[in-house]
Image (cartoon, rainbow, N blue to C red):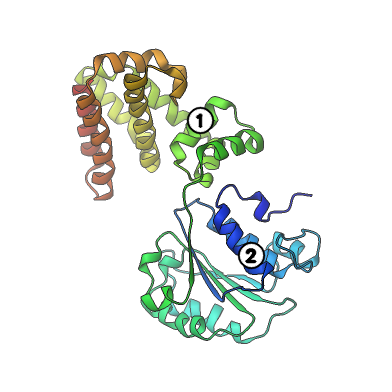
Amino acid sequence: MIVNGFERIVGHEQIVEHLKNAVKYEKVSHAYIFSGEEGAGKRMLAAAFAKTLQCSEKGTEPCGTCLSCIQAESGNQPDIIWVSHEKQNSIGVEDIREQVVGDIQIRPYSSPWKIYIIDEAEKMTVQAQNALLKTVEEPPAYGVILLLTTNAEVFLPTILSRCVLLRLKPVGNKKIKTFLMEEIKVPDYKADLCVAFAQGNVGKAVKLARSESFEEMKGHVVRIFRTVEKMELSDLLSALKELEAFKTDIYDYLDLSLVWFRDVLLFKVTHDANVLVFREEVAALQKHANRSSYEGLECIITAIEKAKVRLRANVNFELAMELMLLTIKENL
């Protein structure tokens, strides 16, 4: 039987050890912050910790067979509460008062702990944080609050000072690649691309490995950049129109573009096809490496990064992409 506990988590060994020791030595704190980018594994860590705390076997892994574990696996453990919020971009004071502050006064239904998991906790308003503060300062003995966030710096200093802060670090590429090949069953070359693109984020790597649109995006990146230096203005305009299809995933597209040109730069330095992510395109990458200067490639990489910055600043999409493509063409 597969149990979604700590053993299923890729990387984050120090955090897992900390949480297991907290359970083993009965040193569980009443408030934790799991801080890391989206897809890094915050939800899995929090869920595994919550399951372990409530498990009837009282070990450092959930057993997977007791009633609590079965309920937790199906999302129906009454003493593991995932806090929800109606507004998409904020968690308001009423959300916290109703689902945490008021509810925590009621003793656990059937478990040793009552655990509240607040995902996207960076969306809590100042008023919501202040409402939570008293509970964090003086929780009942059975209360545990887990705040999951992409940005711990937005919390009030008084919240931060009363929580155990656990920062999720990037996971090693070899571990992610092994996981993708063994668990997701993706081939070697695709695992390499997903790993390079995910930059230590397991969730992102898994999402990419399963994504059909990612394959389409990769194909477009390869097709455009194989021949971009030969394109006439009309060809560039056509490529620009095609980019509209990837507008909703444009940051992923730009990250793929960065991987391509970093491969060019890497081949120029090493002349080793084995270190490349797009190694099946070695002929095109070698051609670019031979034609381009180091300065030109650095200029291209900077241009792609600038395109991301411009888009986040709401610069016109076509203008940002046009400037990027022209810079790439001029420096190849």
Residue 21 is labelled as 2
At 52% from the left edge and 86% from the top edge, which residue is drawn? 138
Label disc, if present, on residue 229 of the rendered structure: none
Q: What amino acid type is highlighted by mark number 2?
A: Asn
- Mark 2, other Cα within 10 Å: few <14 / some 14–19 / many ≥20: some
Q: Please report the residue visible at 39 percent of the width from the left and 12 percent of the height from the top.
A: 283
Q: Badge 1, how many Cα within 10 Å: few under 14, some, many 20+?
A: many
Q: Which residue is mark 1?
A: 192
Q: Amino acid at mark 1?
A: Asp
Residue pictured at 78% horizontal, 69% vertical: 56
- Residue 42 in sight from this viewpoint: yes
| Mark 2 / mark 1, whichever is N-terminal | 2
Residue 284: x and y in percent read 36, 15
Q: Position of residue 328 (x, y in %)?
A: 24, 26
- Quarter of the figure that contains the C terminus: top left
| Label tally | 2
Residue sitting at 36 percent across and 20 percent down? 270
- In the image, 123 versus 2, the foreground residue is 2
Quarter of the view holding residue 4: bottom right
* Quadrant housing residue 238: top left
Give the farthest residue toward the front.
25
